[in-house]
Amino acid sequence: MMMSRLSIYYRIVAMALFIIALLSFATGLIVWDSLDDIVSQQLQKRGAEIATHVALASGNYILMEDLYNLYELAAQTAASSEDVRYILIIDSNKRLLAHTFHGGIPKGLLDDMPDLTQQEISVFNSNEGVIHDIVVPIENGAVGYVRVGMTEEYTRNTINQHIRDVLLTVLVICVLAVFLSSRISALITKPIRNLAEVAESITRGNLVIRANIRERGEVGKLATAFNEMAASLIQASADKEVLVGELLAKEQMRDTLIAKLMTAQEDERKRISRELHDETSQALTSLMLTMRVLAEDAPNQEQKDALLLGRDVAANILREVRDLAIELRPPALDDLGLVAAIERYSEKFAIRHGLNIELNTSGQQTSVDGQIAVALYRIVQESLNNVVKHSGATTVSINITFLPDQIMVTIADNGRGISDSDLIRAQKENRLGLYGMRERVELLQGRLDIRQSLYGGAELSIAIPQYRPRKGESS
Ligand SMILES: Nc1ncnc2c1ncn2[C@@H]1O[C@H](COP(=O)(O)OP(=O)(O)O)[C@@H](O)[C@H]1O
Ligand SMILES: [Mg+2]
């Protein structure tokens, strides 16, 4: 896990170091182990030779109890070899005749020596290190024994010296290995590092940069793939720009189209409304007048009743035509302004649908740009229709707020509210009421929010900036 955080360079160096250290440790262990065995064997072999030599030479001295020569023999033999720690010459009664210790005999060394007929070797630890004790009987023990103590210390020192040399060499090799592997890994990782730099540069948005392709193998293939990728990125981003441009142009066209459609629709409604008011209403009025005159001059009651009935029918039609004309384009919107038009509409709406509608205004009331006034009026109309159609509300509160830099209209009801799933379903079913409101508002740089009202139902909130009439226009 640690490894994955290191760069390739350090990974290679660390790997080389690890392998060399492992190898030298293993070699050291094997050498140490085999040397240990050899040291013991060699030491015991020489000990046995020395003991045998002393045994052969001491037989007669023991028999003659020539202690001086026994001592000389032991001392000279011991002096001739650095490995010999002590030599003991013992007679058949286990009496110590000669020894090479300058002080006293170490405690316990002469304890219970068994009767031996053959050479015997034992190994024990002393305060001077490991001692190999070799006992050689003289004439099968009938004359006595020679004991030689061989110390490992001298050989060990020599071996340790050698091991120190080996360790030093390993150290030098390790340093060399680090140097070499760092050179090698720098060589191996250089093209990869170059590629990484190119990749970073591309990520930062520099798409014209290209990787150097000098290598042949995998790195070369990688570099080629990189360059192709950068080239296709350039192509893709160019394609994307063209697409975005087209999309923006289409969006603009769509906005223009919607704006034109709305204006055309309003103009058409206005025209029909005026036609109904001016032409149709006038015609109906004169028809009613004519019928009344005719009724007054009717020759009999039957004809008079028929004419009066006809006149009543015409009067009903006239009322409906007037309502229709107002519905199509309320003259109040043009004559009295937005607030009055909404007030009239909501009063009628409340009566028609048995709703309780409260209208409040706040802020300094001023005239509103014609297009914005029409949009807000239509939105209030659609919202009130939605309340009746979907909410089951009993009360609606309409607030119109005039601020210096924006006009806000909220329509809040106490119905069941609009959930996200309602909106998703409406979109799937291509219902355009709310969608159309939002489009209208966004065309006027405003925003429309749908949230929960204080009364628990739905609240639509519309804010439109710069709502005052532009110069040369009045509303
Ligand atoms: N005041 C409201 N209260 C509850 N639900 C509403 C309200 N207004 C709109 N909705 C929900 O939002 C949906 C979308 O409304 P709209 O876009 O006007 O489409 P439509 O009126 O044709 O269904 C409606 O179908 C209805 O589920
Ligand atoms: Mg609707």
Image (spheres, rainbow, N blue to C red):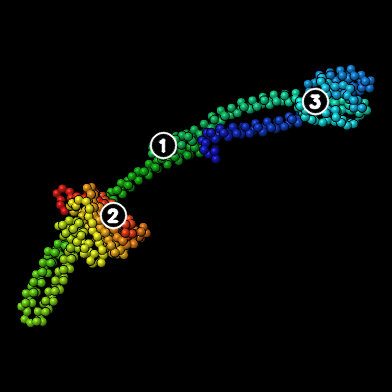
Whole-number angstrom distance, CA of label 3 to CA of label 2: 108 Å
Residues at circles 3 and 2 in contact by the CB criterion of under 8 Å? no
Amino acid type indicated by mark 3: Met
Image position, residue 216 (x, y; %): 50, 36
Q: Which mark is residue 461?
A: 2
Q: Split into 4 quadrants, where in the image is the N terminus?
A: top right
- The residue closer to the viewer here, 313 or 408, is 408
Q: Is residue 40 left or right of residue 457?
A: right
- Find out whether the residues at labels 2 and 1 contact each other: C-beta distance under 8 Å: no
Q: What whole-number distance in Å separates the C-alpha atoms at marks 2 and 1?
A: 47 Å
Q: SS class of the residue under badge 2?
A: strand
Residue 395, picture quadrant: bottom left
Q: Nearer the viewer, residue 346 or 306?
A: 346
Tell me the kind of residue under disc 2: Ser
Q: Earlier in the sequence, mark 1 or mark 3?
A: 3
The residue that disc 1 covers is: 201
How crowded is the residue under tag 2: few (<14 C-alpha within 10 Å), some, or many (20+)?
some
Q: Residue 262: x percent and y percent?
A: 22, 56
Q: Is residue 131 visible?
A: yes
Which amino acid lies under the numbered mark 1 shown in the image of this protein? Ser
